[in-house]
Image (spheres, rainbow, N blue to C red):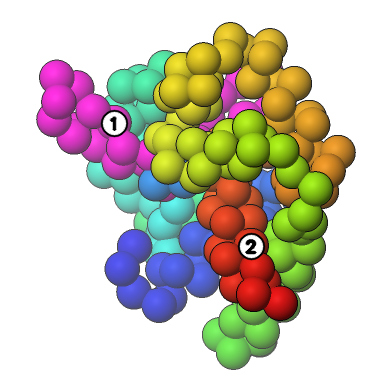
């Protein structure tokens, strides 16, 4: 979604999914086959042990949207899930039900008087999220831990970071737990969130070091 309206709808959609118990594992997930990007999924979410391929629509769901959501979900072995403002028509609703495509309707959870009110709510949520993200400690780390943070900051996923650090899955988990105890990582979540926290840490450390 390139438009401003699309950005706010997508941000709101992810907040709604989290309020419904979904964990957002990754955003803008690219599906690559034989070195070629064949699709992009707005987000990957998890709930109750199930993985979902999430598509967010700022408008209403058509039969074409239903087919696309199902195809993308099948590519990554996940369940299809669409977040939108409603169905374009009855055939789209029936089609989604028949194909097992779950649809979360935005109006079922939020009603806004204006776009400005929506923006204020989301901006408030973003400020709160940034405040938590920036509330990290930049002191008391060993050279090995600092090296690990730098590796995490430039790795694509946990597997790559573990390999570059010479750790197995258990060792990597222990490292993250240690960083969390020291206040470097403020909360658990997807690797994308962990990578962002690592980058914020390095940026803050650089900015505060002269002080």
Q: Which mark is residue 107?
A: none
Q: Is residue 127 above or below residue 170?
A: below
Assess disc 1: are there few (<14), some (14-19) or many (≥20) residues with their C-alpha within 10 Å of its C-alpha.
some
Report which quarter residue 40 is drawn in: top left
Report which quarter residue 135 is drawn in: bottom right
Residue 16: percent from the left, percent from the top? 67, 54
Image position of 114 (left or right of 154): right
Q: Is residue 187 above or below residue 139?
A: above
Residue drawn at 45 percent across, 69 percent down: 7
Residue range highlighted in magenta: 29-53
Residue 180: percent from the left, percent from the top? 79, 39
Residue sitting nearer the eye, 128 or 6: 128
Residue drawn at 63 percent across, 56 percent down: 201
Query: Circle 1 sits on which residue?
Result: 31
Residue sitting nearer the eye, 98 or 27: 27
Q: Secondary structure at mark 2?
A: helix
Report which quarter residue 68 is drawn in: top left
Residue sitting nearer the eye, 158 or 35: 158
Q: Is residue 54 above or below residue 203?
A: above
Q: Which mark is residue 205?
A: 2
Residue drawn at 18 percent across, 33 percent down: 38
**Residue 77 appears anywhere in the view:** yes
Q: Are marks 2 and 1 in contact (CB under 8 Å)?
A: no
Q: Is residue 174 magenta?
A: no
- First of labels 2, 1 by sequence position: 1
Q: Is residue 38 magenta?
A: yes
Residue 130: percent from the left, percent from the top? 68, 67
Quarter in which the N terminus is drawn: bottom left
């Amino acid at each position: 979604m390139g438009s401003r309206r699309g950005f706010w709808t997508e941000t709101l959609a992810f907040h709604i999914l989290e309020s419904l118990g979904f964990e957002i594992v990754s955003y803008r997930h690219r599906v690559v086959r034989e070195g070629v990007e064949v699709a992009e999924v707005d987000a990957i979410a998890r709930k109750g042990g199930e993985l979902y391929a999430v598509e967010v629509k700022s408008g209403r769901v058509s039969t074409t949207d239903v087919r696309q959501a199902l195809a993308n979900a099948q590519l990554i072995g996940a369940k299809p899930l669409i977040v939108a403002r409603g169905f374009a028509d009855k055939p789209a609703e029936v089609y989604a039900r028949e194909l097992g495509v779950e649809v979360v309707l935005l109006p079922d959870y939020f009603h806004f008087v204006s776009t400005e009110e929506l923006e204020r709510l989301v901006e408030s949520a973003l400020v709160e999220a940034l405040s938590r993200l920036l509330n990290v400690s930049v002191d008391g780390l060993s050279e090995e831990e600092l090296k690990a943070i730098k590796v995490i900051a430039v790795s694509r996923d946990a597997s790559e970071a573990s390999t570059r650090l010479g750790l197995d899955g258990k060792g990597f988990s222990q490292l993250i737990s240690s960083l969390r105890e020291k206040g470097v990582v403020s909360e658990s979540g997807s690797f994308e969130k962990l990578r962002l926290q690592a980058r914020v840490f390095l940026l803050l450390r650089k900015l505060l070091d002269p002080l």
